[in-house]
Amino acid sequence: MPLKGHSLFSNSFFIFIIRFFPSLANLVVVIWYSRHLSLEAYGNYQHFWIQLYVIYPLACFGIHVLIITYSRGLIINLMRRIGRQYYVMYGLWVAGLSAVFAWLQWGALNISFVVPFLFLASFSFAMILESLLIVFRNYTSLTIISILYSVGFAVIHWYVLAHGFSLELLFVYLLILTVCRLGVYLGIALFNVKQHTVGEGDEVIAINTIRNLWLHLGVYDVIQILFNWIDKFIISLVLTAQLSAIYVNGSRNIPILPLLLSAAGSAVLIQLAGGKREDEAADMIRLMNQTGKILSAIIFPVFFFLLFFRQELIVTFLTDKYLLAVPIFMVSILVLPLRAYSFTTVLQKMHKGAIINTGAVADLLFACGLMYPLYKWLGLPGVALSFVISTYFQSAYYLYYAAKSLNSSPLKLIPYANWLVKLIVYATMFIVIHYVCTEYFTVKISLILGMAMMVVITIISFLFELNKGKRDVSI
């Protein structure tokens, strides 16, 4: 079965767009609230979200990730085969975690128990249904819902801040918005399930195989969330609030780039979920190379822009009181080139969940082991460096086993020659751009010009790779 390049791009684009708008709205709110709320009020606001993002993966426990792995027919058949008692058990599991989350918010923020309880439950179910609708390819509906939700999210934050900030009132309004999104998702999902007729071409996989992959993906998802937050959590416990704030701002993830990687990985899995192929390994290698080339056309220019304009970014958006965050930010973004490749996609497709989790656990333990010695040597940038180093080792581990599972060599799975040329070209370009901008213009104008050049370079590079991929191979 041929895999069309425009299909891969279309799937990646829509999955990215669906998740882009909520991420953008959240970024705008974070900047706005950090400037207008007191440190205590902003800290309480972030307290809610940090604990939500840590607990909701436990509630989903890999279901939202597992769904993307399989075809629509298999998922629907599986839903129909699962006994009612398992749905009840899962509902109780989510309710229990929602109670824990609600208790934590009630104790720390003095928010009514009901609001965070319903918030976590509705948020978790919405994440699962969103993945289901992506498999159904309801991209238009999901895009419209995403835009409306994002606008509502931003408007609610603006309204509450403008009319006397109340944390509980804010999350009551956000709960209503989240429940509305969940209701619409549920209605569309039920319609799709009822419309589907079981066909002979539907893929069939043993329940034990699916269950094993689900357990591995659930553990992996939880570990990944912990990996993203453990450094910030530890620093908040052992250092002052001021140093903690500097570290958190310096090590903040660039929100759009993980969305690109997730969208590309999901699109590859969707492309490969349509049944058996004559040479699935070759198809997978071609797809991974193509996505690596396309992603690098976006991520590499962004990386070099952030690297060379790091001080201008911090000063402009966070003010000069966060200058100490600049070296932390510089170290943290060294991991960005790895975001041009989804190292777990092949392993997920090949049901190598044990390998994925072994790498995730080793990554977390290695990073935690490096934290203290590197902190003693380099200070706070050393803490960030420990997670960068461990991530590079983890990526090499995943690449080795992905190649082994496809009976190939690691170098065949990645477009290393393409990447090397881009790294040299983009590095040279941004060294020149940064020098010219900072030599002749003010900080703000330099930043604007740098961003404009980044956008132009990214668009040209992306279109070049997209057109080249269509010419070279029909994927």
Image (cartoon, grey):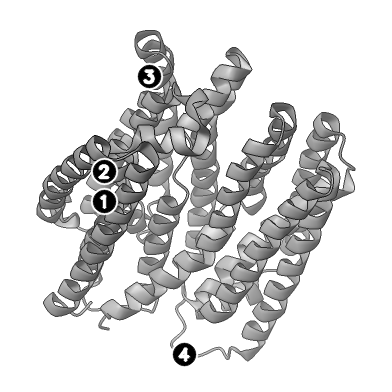
Mark linked to residue 382: 3
Residue identified by numbered label 2: 304
Amino acid carrying mark 2 in the image: Phe
Q: Looking at the image, which residue is at 42% across and 18% down?
A: 371
Q: Which mark is residue 85?
A: none
Quadrant assignment, res 348: bottom left
Q: Position of residue 70 (x, y in %)?
A: 46, 70
Q: Earlier in the sequence, mark 3 or mark 2?
A: 2
Which of the two residues, 308 or 422, is positioned nearer the viewer here?
308
Q: How far is disc 1 from disc 4 in space, using C-alphas?
A: 46 Å
Q: In which quadrant is the N terminus drawn?
A: bottom left
Distance of label 3 from label 2 (alpha carbons): 21 Å
Kind of residue at badge 4: Glu
- Mark 4 — residue? 200
Mark in the foreground, 3 or 2 = 2
Instruction: Give left or right: position of 108 versus 342.
Output: right
The reply to whether residue 280 is in sight is: yes
| Residue 81, image x, y percentages | 64, 74
Label 2 packing within 10 angstroms: few (<14), some (14-19), many (20+) = many
Judge the density around disc 3: few (<14), some (14-19), many (≥20) Cα neighbours within 10 Å: many
Q: Which sits earlier in the primary sequence, circle 1 or circle 4?
A: 4
